[in-house]
Image: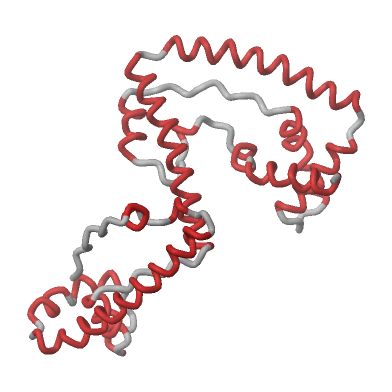
Amino acid sequence: MAFQGLLFRVSNSLNNCRFLLNTRIPQLNQVSGVKQHVVKALQELKVPEKPKRPLTPYFKFVQERRESIIKQYPDWKVTQVSVQCAADWKALDKSTKSKYEERYKTDIEQYAKKYSEYMNSLTPEQKEALENYKHEVKQAKVRRERKKKIRETGKPKRPVGAYMLYVMEQAKLPSNANKSYVTLLGQLKDTWAEMPEGEKAKYLQETAKAKQQYEEDLKNWELKMMEEGNLDVVRNSTLTGKSPKPRKSK
């Protein structure tokens, strides 16, 4: 049980690694997946920085301890440093832990006062923009976790379209060896548009065959996900029994 508790604390440490490394408020940093119009609203309204929430006793200890551990063991990975920090905190005497706890009580009281003053200084528009941002940050996290689950559960990848198949084929030619796909996509657009339907047929047929296989694989994957209770990665159309809207293909 003690070892499991240590692992749990290490897990929390890793999850909060970003918080330890950068304690500035979210709206002044890049948060993965946050919609730009939400961030833009904060910038346009010039929403000021929030007061920094103080670190808890444990994470304050980690912040102070990790630098000396890294100096002592420069080749250690983040996980190893985190494990050592957790072990050092567990071994810390009660008197020293109490000092961290007392300091935190003082810091959190000061933070509460500053935060109240900060919120009172905001206009209604700024408060609304800030709430929208906080909501969007949570939604972005949900989307990231969903994408991660999709990758980890092996969701079938959608096949490329007929035009992309043609571009991929052309990319293999010696004359195009030094050209990127982005370049070829632009250069070959007119050639593809003017290509006789007879020449396009093989690419279209290959795409249709790949799409049929993809739909079958996706159906089986979604059935498996529903059986395992992973409904959040299954399309709404599958859950409701309604046919999904057809995607436009080139």
Q: Is residue 110 above or below residue 88?
A: above
Of 174 and 37, the residue lying toward us: 37
The quarter of the rendered structure image containing the C terminus is bottom left
Q: Is residue 91 above or below residue 55?
A: below
Q: Is residue 157 above or below residue 69?
A: below
Taking the image as shown, residue 169 lies to the left or right of residue 197, namely right
In the rendering, at what x and y percent does residue 217 appear?
40, 73
Q: Which quarter of the picture shows residue 135?
A: top left
Taking the image as shown, residue 224 lies to the left or right of residue 177, namely right
Q: Residue at x 58, y 24 (%)?
A: 52
In the rendering, at what x and y percent does residue 87 appear?
84, 43
Model colouring? secondary structure
In the rendering, at what x and y percent does residue 236 appear?
34, 52
Taking the image as shown, residue 6 lies to the left or right of residue 176, namely right
Q: Residue at x 27, y 87 (%)?
A: 175
Taking the image as shown, residue 184 lies to the left or right of residue 217, namely left
Count of all numbered marks drawn on residues in the image: 0
Of 214 and 174, the residue lying toward us: 214
Q: Which quarter of the picture shows residue 213?
A: bottom left
Q: Is residue 29 above or below residue 205?
A: above
Q: Residue at x 40, y 25 (%)?
A: 130
In the rendering, at what x and y percent does residue 23 appear?
58, 32
Q: Residue at x 72, y 34 (%)?
A: 59
